Image: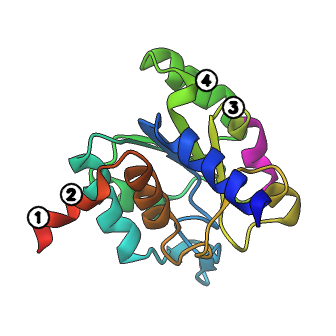
């Protein structure tokens, strides 16, 4: 029990400084399923509305959102555009290089960055973040490298869980929720 409390305390302490949440898409914002039609085109992607509203919450609370996906996807680009996410990078093989470039351009400190990823391509970028997070159904090796494993599986509200975790750690969650009561 003491070990769990220490881990929870470490995650809370790290989350207190987070100003930027970087997320992968497939396996985090979606369940990882890719649907291809007879013409070989990606027909659609399924995103969770809880994650969509979490973008609104994050924006309202001045948490910056950055999306870095290894797969080029018009569905991802369309969904992010609709949500108003401006830092969206798809088809990125070297996620660490892209994240490092964005960190430099936005003059961020890595202690202000949380990264959510589910697969091996995310590990190098995760190494640049203070808070490393994986969905419940991430690859086992990735889960062994992170600070926090969400209760939700990819496509099931992972991003929402992370936004709420950060805001609770920062003592801003309860006051934000008051606007809905």
In this rendering, is residue 10 above or below 7? above
Q: Position of residue 163 (x, y in %)?
A: 42, 56
- Which one is nearer the viewer's eye here, 60 or 66? 60
Ranked by sequence position, the earlier of labels 1 and 3 is: 3
Ranked by sequence position, the earlier of labels 2 and 4 is: 4
Q: Are marks 4 and 1 in contact (CB under 8 Å)?
A: no
Q: Main secondary structure of the magenta part?
A: helix
For marks 3 and 2, give the CA distance.
32 Å
Horizontal side of 63 relative to 119 (left or right) equals left
- Which one is nearer the viewer's eye here, 73 or 55? 55
Q: What is the span of residues highlighted in magenta in the rendered image?
A: 119-124
Q: Which residue does the image show at 76% across and 67% down from the upper left?
A: 1
In this rendering, is residue 65 above or below 40? above
For marks 2 and 4, give the CA distance.
31 Å
Q: Position of residue 3 (x, y in %)?
A: 79, 58
For marks 1 and 2, give the CA distance.
6 Å
For marks 4 and 3, give the CA distance.
6 Å
In this rendering, is residue 15 above or below 174? above
Q: Which residue is mark 4?
A: 100
Q: Is residue 123 magenta?
A: yes
Which mark is on residue 179? 1
For label 2, the SS is helix
For label 3, the SS is helix
Q: Quadrant of the C terminus?
A: bottom left
Q: Are marks 4 and 3 in contact (CB under 8 Å)?
A: yes
Q: Which residue is mark 2?
A: 176
Q: Position of residue 126 (x, y in %)?
A: 70, 40
Residue furthest to the right in view is: 141
């Amino acid at each position: 029990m003491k070990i769990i409390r220490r881990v929870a305390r470490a995650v809370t302490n790290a989350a207190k400084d987070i100003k930027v949440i970087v997320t992968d898409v497939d396996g985090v914002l979606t369940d990882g399923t890719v649907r291809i039609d007879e013409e070989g085109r990606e027909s659609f992607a399924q995103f969770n509305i809880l994650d969509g509203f979490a973008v609104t919450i994050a924006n309202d609370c001045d948490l910056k959102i950055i999306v870095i996906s290894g797969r080029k996807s018009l569905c991802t680009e369309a969904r992010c555009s609709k949500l108003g996410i401006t830092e969206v990078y798809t088809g990125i093989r070297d996620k660490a290089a892209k994240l490092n470039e964005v960190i430099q351009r936005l003059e961020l400190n890595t202690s202000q960055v949380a990264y959510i990823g589910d697969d091996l391509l995310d590990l190098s970028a995760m190494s640049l973040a203070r808070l490393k997070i994986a969905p419940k159904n991430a690859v086992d090796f990735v889960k062994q490298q992170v600070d926090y494993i969400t209760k939700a599986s990819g496509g099931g509200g992972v991003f929402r869980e992370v936004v709420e975790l950060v805001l609770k750690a920062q003592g801003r969650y309860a006051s934000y929720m008051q606007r809905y009561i």
